[in-house]
Image (tube, helix red, strand yellow):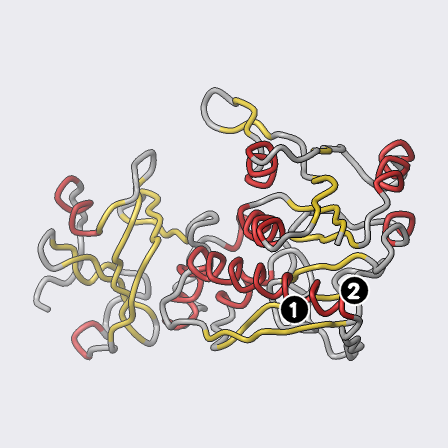
Amino acid sequence: MKIVFMGTPDFAEKSLEAIYNSGHEILAVVTNPDRPKGRGMKLIASPVKQYAEENGMKIYQPQKVKGNIEFIEELKSQNPDVICVVAYGKLLPKEILEIPKYGCINVHGSLLPKYRGAAPIQWSVLNGDKTTGVTTIYMDEGMDSGDMILKEEVKIGEYETTGELWDRLSKVGAHLLVKTLKEIGAGTAKREKQDDDFTMAPMLNKSMAQIDWENQSAEQIKNLIRGLNPIMGAYTYVNNKKLKIWKAELKPYTENVKDLKNGDVVLADSKKGLEFKAKDGIIRAIEVQGDNGKRMKAEEYLRGNTIIWKYDKL
């Protein structure tokens, strides 16, 4: 089939690669404009653009799509059979949705109707879900509300991070998109309406990154840490210094720390590790990052940083 592909991050790049390698004709690729990054604020192309350039594909990078008459007319001139949309980052207006012969197809990182919105993978980890998956849908003007085509469920590991799950689901999504296009081409693709019992997965914000030792359970703290890895990192304050915790594990609550406050350091030893008291368990930090420092093992961090702690008889 003749396809216009719309997407931006590495999650989308896997889908573009899969449909290109499966023999479909990529008429054009639409991705977000280059963004400044790093200390020098150098403009960096998206992973989708980089792949498209490497393979000689036509590229569009509109600042906006809604009301962009020139861009919409250019898409019409491509006369695509399908527009594939994977983590593009913008809602498509009716004028674009009506262009392709077989409609616009979206790859979404959840088992719809659960987690419509911008951050489905992150919220599945933050909420401690045991399973998630990928859904392909026919797009409509709503937010991930179109008729469903195919689904594939995957299990989430107990300590799996958002980054790790993101990578796995990008491959699942790529496979599912190729399968979806095959069924559309053969005329066997089904349409299943979503029910009204949906949940949303809004964008994350920095205010949620600080660990709330008083109100969050040990399990919730564990999920916060892995859910914000590698996006922003959950953090706490130790000796009045900000410390990000990138990876952690749970340990059973012990009687000998019951008199300490939630959030207190109960172990800080360069050989034994770094542990905190939660209200119903112990959080053992595995990988941390100090202010202006790099990510490292907790034991390595403790070899260069002294932490005053209140209980040294564990």
The numbered disc on residue 300 is none
- Quadrant of res 116: bottom right
Which of the labelled discs sits on residue 135, or is there none?
A: 1
The answer to whether 119 appears left or right of 28 in the picture is: left
**Residue at 56% from the left image edge and 38% from the top image edge:** 51
Nearest the viewer among 226 and 263 is 226
Q: Is residue 204 visible?
A: no
Tell me the residue that label 2 is attached to: 138
Residue in view at x 32 percent, y 61 percent: 263
* SS at badge 2: strand
For the point 55% across and 75% down, the residue is 153
Check contact, mark 1 vs mark 2: CB within 8 A.
no
Q: Residue at x 18, y 55 (%)?
A: 309
Q: Position of residue 294 (x, y in %)?
A: 30, 38
Quadrant of the rendered structure where residue 57 is?
top right
Q: Which secondary structure, mark 1?
A: strand
Crowd tier of the residue under label 2, counting other residues whose Cα lies within 10 Å: few below 14, some 14–19, many 20 or above = many
Residue 311's spot in the image, x, y percent? 14, 63
Q: Amino acid at mark 1?
A: Thr
Label 1, label 2: how far apart the Cα atoms are: 10 Å
Q: Is residue 222 above or below residue 28?
A: below
On screen, residue 273 versus residue 112, left or right, reads left
Measured from the top left, where is residue 268 in percent x and y? 16, 55
